[in-house]
Amino acid sequence: MKVLTYVLCLYLPVCVVQAAPLYIEQVKLSTTDEQKLQEAHKQIKDHSEVTLKENLFVSPFHQQSQYQSTDKKSFCNTCHQQQPHSVDKRKRSFLNMHSRYISCETCHFSPENVQLEYRWLNFNETGNKIPAKRITPFYNKEAVLIFSDHELAAQARETWDKKSSIEVLNRERAKLKLRLHTPLSKEGPECIDCHNNKDPLLDLKSLGFTKKEITKLQQHSIPRFFSRFTKEEQRLRMSDLLQ
């Protein structure tokens, strides 16, 4: 087999061994300990599904656009909902809005000592006339993420659908959850980390934004409004947006 591979490499124009996406490499390197495993077990045990309400008695104040499904699904959507942010009631609507054009890994995947490049990645197939682009981290010219058709997603679904005692099942789920989430950061960056003109996380110019668009994004009033909250229970008035 090794001889055959060598011969093929001699005669083919290019012989490339495709490296696994960086996220997969990080998952393979992830380690667990009993304390983290217990924390993951508790999170699964305490977890409850979030039901999105529709046809509300009082219509939403802001105009809502229907979510456009994509041909390729994020690996995160194997378990998480399409609108994954629910804990921070103050920001969750804005965070979920961002998930329409920013991949999860952009905010939650930043391995140490690794220089990532951010580009637009189309989540629709090539033949689809409607693009569904997301800002996505790349490493060595390859997207770091995987999609929901990856074998790891199938493994996650199989683990979740197993028939076993709830204690045994939750422990298996906890091991998988910890393994998949170890390369990720639970908390993403603050809004102001991107929406500023001094040291923004993303190079908006390289992503194709015009000078006018960059100014609008970096000087947006909403992130500045959120940055004034120093405590979870703190309340600010909408008039503070004008300051």
Image (spheres, rainbow, N blue to C red):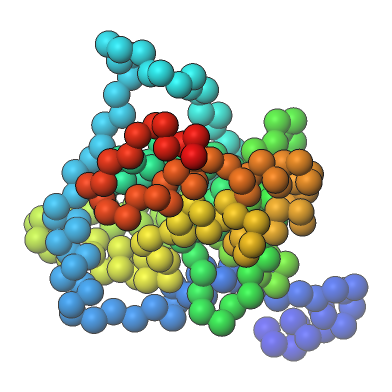
Q: In this picture, is 23 found above or below 239?
A: below
| 10 relative to 94 in the view: left or right | right
In the image, residue 71 sits, relative to residue 55, either above or below, namely: below
Image height check: is 213 above or below 195?
above
Q: Which residue lies furthest to the front in this view?
A: 243
Q: In terms of depth relative to the viewer, which is nearer, 58 or 164?
A: 58
Which residue is depicted at the point 49% across and 39% down? 243
Q: Is residue 151 in sight in this rendering?
A: no
Q: Position of residue 157 (x, y in %)?
A: 34, 52
Instruction: Name the spot of residue 87 as percent of width and height, x first.
Output: 28, 46
Q: In this view, does 153 lie to the left or right of 40?
A: right
Q: Can residue 34 be spotted in the picture?
A: yes
Asked where in the image residue 239 lies, by quadrant, the reply is: top left
Residue in view at x 72 percent, y 41 percent? 213
Q: Position of residue 198 (x, y in %)?
A: 64, 62
Q: Is residue 179 above or below residue 78?
A: below
- Which x, y percent locates residue 120? 69, 50
Which quadrant would residue 3 be assigned to in this image?
A: bottom right
* Count of numbered marks: 0
Taking the image as shown, residue 96 lies to the left or right of residue 15, namely left
Q: Nearer the viewer, residue 108 or 229?
A: 229
